[in-house]
Image: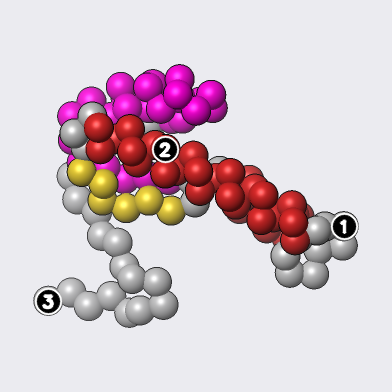
Amino acid sequence: MAACHKLRIYGIHKARFSRIECHESITAYGREILLQTIDLAEEMGFEILHGIVDSLWVKGNDPQELCRRASEHIGITLEHKGIFKWIVFCRTGQTAQVR
């Protein structure tokens, strides 16, 4: 899914050598991996907080086990990046308002 960050290379925004079909394929593949990982996380009892492109934030026990099982299932190594006591997700294109 990290390849989705390389949109200019694969067909978007004035790329010199690219095709939109390549970008669409990469994006579809990444979306499928994200959806499969979400399904697995829910089966394991995790609450899905947020998911986008190459990241998934969950609430629950043993996120390392989720990464291990998801990696095994999809065939790509996923990494556990950390445990956060709190996190804020702002709406895209909106100004965050703290009250």
Locate residue 23, reporting x and y percent: 69, 55
77 vs 63, left or right, is: right
Element assignment for label 1: loop
Q: Label 1, on which residue?
A: 17
Res 89 seen here: yes
Q: In front here: 70 or 85?
A: 70
User: Identity of the amino acid at label 3?
Assistant: Arg
Locate residue 14, reporting x and y percent: 80, 69
Badge 3, how many Cα within 10 Å: few under 14, some, many 20+? Answer: few
Q: Is residue 45 magenta?
A: no
C-alpha separation, residue under disc 3 versus residue under disc 1: 48 Å
C-alpha separation, residue under disc 1 versus residue under disc 2: 31 Å
Kindly identify which numbered label has been placed on residue 36.
2
- Numbered range of the magenta stretch: 55-79
4 vs 51, left or right, is: right
Q: Residue 59 appears in which quarter of the rendering?
A: top left
Split into 4 quadrants, where in the image is the C terminus?
bottom left
Res 2 seen here: no
